[in-house]
Each structure stands twice: as structure tokens, then as C-alpha cells.
Amino acid sequence: MQGIRILRSETVLEDVPVLYRPGVVFVLQGAKQGFLNGEVYHYDADHYLAVSVPVPFRMASQADPEHPLLAIYVDFDLHLAAEIVSILEGQIDHDERARARSLVSSPMVPSIVDVLQRLLHALHHPRELTVLGPGLLRELHYRVLVGPQGGPLMAALHRNNATGRIVQSLMLIRERYTAALSVTEVAAMAGMSVPSYHAGFKSLTGNTPIQYIKAMRLHEARVKIAQRRGSIAAIAAEVGYASAAQFSRDFKRHFQRSPSEDAQWMREHLGEAGQG
């Protein structure tokens, strides 16, 4: 089913740079941790990780051949999530509102376990998946958004405030990350002053806008190189680098491996999609 991926890994990973798409990660066996802005996010059999906006962070995981890590990744349908947030907006008490967060680690609760089990069952029965899949995904979106820490997610997905404008600018950055974007330009996209935009952006993503754009370019290049979609120099130019040498230096600084070394490592440990 589109938007759902299952990962199996037998490898212990430490301090791996990743960039997750908006969605939720359920770890069925093993354990993972995310590190962003001095905080640790646990996702294991007792906790799931929800990601409201694409954000680069660092990850570690525990697994071995006898107890491989098993995880399911469900991408957010952002239009569906926004629709649910809009419906719920008038029904949320003010004391339930929270500061927007890009990453949220929440305990597994019975309602989440129930819909996840039904979704996993449907994935093994094509007819059920065709008929019930869309409804199960809608229910899963709802359960996550009203879950134990759904408030920070809803705040990030709410479009009619400053955070919502920053989130919208992230979508524009995603579309134009290969261009020579300036902070002044992206702040103007969000209809905000540069200082306000910079502060809000750093609070939400843990990165400055310039750091974020560079990370976006490097992660996109990483996937393209792993998928053998061109030479390293051609891919460097494709993601917005004028100098292949500068690209290689930035890449090695970020991933601790050269582009060719990392491509081999990623195919072995993360798959060509590059999300561990």
C-alpha cells in the first residue's frame, strides 16, 4: 500500500544522520532513539515516533540476528491530517493546546495498538486492504493526532498561525531546495520578519534555515547516489551545488563517509530510500 514501508534490520546503528518524511514510525521489535536539539526520542515496542515536518536528526537503533529490528513506517497524508485538525480545532480546550513540535515520542495506547493490528492484518489480505485500507489509515491519523502527545503535532499541522506559515515555507523549500534560497526570501514566503522566522524555524526544526536547506540537499543527494541515478558530480549539481569538491566535503562532514562509501553502506543498512 502506498505510504507504508516495513523495515527489517539486524544491525546496531549509532549516530546516523536521517531525514524522515512526515509520518509515524512503529517499532514492533527492537528499539530506536532519535536525537535532536539536545533531546532524546525513544521509539520501541512501547513508544511510537510521530514526525510532523521533514526534519534532519540523528538516529540509533538496537538489533541483532536473533532479534532483528522490525518497524513499520506510515507516511502522513498531509491533506487528510489537515482536514482532521480542522474538524477537531473547535473541540480542543485551550489547556490542551501545546507548542508545535517536529518530533514527538508517545506511549503506545490500546486505541493505537488496535488500529495498528487491524492495519497489519489488512496488509496480508489484499481484498481487505482494498476495501478497509483507506478507512484504517484515516483512523490511524486520527488516533495519532488525539493521542497522548497529539497536541504538539496538531499545533504543527494547524495552518492559520505563525507555525503553520513556517510549515508551509518548509513545503516550498522542499520544492525549491536546489535553488539559491536566502533566509530573507523564505521568511518573505512565510510573511514574517527575518528574526521571527529564524527563531520560529529553529524552535520547530532544531536547525537554522541555512542548515536545513544544506541538510535537505545532502539527504536528497544521498538517496540519488544510493539509487545510482547519476554520477556524484552530476547529482551534486542537481541538488544545487556549484562545486563537486565542496559537495564531497560537506557530504563527508555530515555523514562521516565519502559519497561512494556511504552509498554502499546505505544499501546494506538503510535501503535505497535512506530512512532507518
Image (cartoon, grey):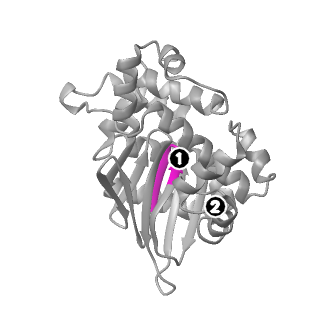
Badge 1 is on which residue?
Answer: 137
Say whether residue 174 is visible: yes
Residue 186 located left or right of residue 34: right
As drawn, the label of residue 258 is 2
* Residue type highlighted by circle 2: Ser
Picture coordinates of residue 123, whole percent (x, y) = 61, 61
Q: Secondary structure at mark 2?
A: loop
Say whether residue 132 is visible: no
Please check the rendered image and state whether residue 255 is part of the magenta-colored stretch, yes or no. Answer: no
Residue 11 located left or right of residue 15: right
Q: Secondary structure at mark 1?
A: helix
Q: Residue at x 71, y 59 (%)?
A: 226
Residue 174 located left or right of residue 39: right
Q: Disc 1 or disc 2, which is closer to the eye?
A: 2
Quarter of the figure with residue 273: bottom right
As drawn, the label of residue 248 is none
Please check the rendered image and state whether residue 20 is part of the magenta-colored stretch, yes or no. Answer: yes
Quarter of the figure with residue 143: top left
Q: The magenta stretch spans which residues?
A: 18-26
| Nearest to N terminus: mark 1 or mark 2 | 1
* Residue type highlighted by circle 1: Leu
Query: Which residue is most to the bottom?
Result: 66
Magenta stretch secondary structure, dominant: strand
Q: Residue at x 54, y 63 (%)?
A: 120
* Above or below 256: residue 198: above
Q: Residues within 10 Å of mark 1 (few under 14, many from 20)?
A: many
Q: Residue at x 80, y 53 (%)?
A: 231
Asked if the residue under mark 2 is in contact with the one under mark 1, i.e. CB atoms within 8 Å, the reply is no
Picture coordinates of residue 275, whole percent (x, y) = 56, 57
Q: Residue at x 72, y 51 (%)?
A: 224
* Above or below 104: residue 171: above
Q: Compute the Cα span from label 1 to label 2.
A: 39 Å
